[in-house]
Amino acid sequence: SAVISQKPSRDICQRGTSLTIQCQVDSQVTMMFWYRQQPGQSLTLIATANQGSEATYESGFVIDKFPISRPNLTFSTLTVSNMSPEDSSIYLCSVEDLQGWGDTQYFGPGTRLTVL
Amino acid sequence: GENVEQHPSTLSVQEGDSAVIKCTYSDSASNYFPWYKQELGKRPQLIIDIRSNVGEKKDQRIAVTLNKTAKHFSLHITETQPEDSAVYFCAAKKGNKLVFGAGTILRVKS
């Protein structure tokens, strides 16, 4: 597996502002993903962060709202833009290493976002 | 796309009893089925997984069974303990994409 960290661990933000969440892995990984977990709900995939190219977004998520970067094989950022209270959620990154441990995805500790 | 249904949504058992959580998936091309445990305020942790070429897998008190024909898979926890209390999520993977079930809140009463 891998050691995954996220920053910040939590934040309280005002509506209309943006927050960038960082995900750092202690080893190079093939795949990085961003999920949203709304209060009391399951995990929903936002996008796959692709190294060196634009992220692949799932239905219902768009780049203008959730821009993602992945400059290398150990780091990715997710920005939540122009926030509203409906964006209050836990945001989690996950990683997968097809050349290492295979299919399994491991999750970071999450970022708890509250929008006022 | 893939759709995963999970039942029950909540499950209460007495300590020492067994617990079973069931999931069904819709896409026969899905080939990997992990189970995650999420304690309050923590990240989802993988507890067991199974691939489509295997029918059953066991790890101590935890087992997973897969019926590819019926497209369903189940998590079995035996001799439950209070520390098993958590939310459990099943998932199905097709390609690189994991689709999660809605989750089951398991409460183990001592």
Image (tube, rainbow, N blue to C red):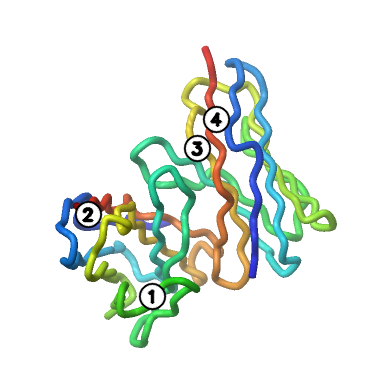
Q: Nearer the viewer, residue A42 or A88?
A: A88
* Mark 2 and mark 4: Cα distance apart in space: 30 Å
Q: The residue tagged with tag 3: helix, strand or loop?
A: strand
The residue under label 2 is which amino acid type? Val
Location of residue B15 in the rendering, given as x and y in whole percent from the top left corner: 58, 16
Q: Position of residue B93 (x, y in %)?
A: 61, 63
Q: Quadrant of the N terminus of chain B?
A: bottom right
Q: Please, what is the three-letter code of the amino acid marked with disc 1?
A: Ala
Assess whether mark 4 and mark 3 are in contact (beta carbons under 8 angstroms). Answer: yes
Name the residue at the right extreme. B69
Whole-number angstrom distance, CA of label 3 to CA of label 4 = 6 Å
Q: Which residue is mark 3?
A: B87
User: In the rendered structure, the residue with mark 3 lies on which chain?
Assistant: B
Which residue in the structure is indicated by mark 2?
A115
Residue A93 falls in image quadrant: bottom left
Which numbered disc, 2 or 1, marks the residue closer to the eye? Answer: 2
Q: Where in the figure is residue A66, as x and y percent of width and height?
A: 32, 72
Q: Amino acid at mark 4?
A: Leu
Instruction: Indicate the secondary structure of the residue bearing disc 4.
Output: strand
Say which of B2 and B18 sits in front.
B2
Q: Residue B106 bears which disc, if any?
A: 4
In this rendering, which labeled residue sits more in front, label 4 or label 1? 4
Residue that carries the numbered disc 1 in the rendered image: A49
Chain label for disc 4: B
Q: Secondary structure at mark 2?
A: strand
Is B31 located above or below residue B59 in the figure? Answer: below
Q: Is residue B41 left or right of residue A18?
A: right
**Horizontal relation, residue A74 to residue B7: left or right:** left
Q: SS for tag 1?
A: strand
Q: Indicate which disc, 3 or 4, sits on the residue closer to the N terminus.
A: 3
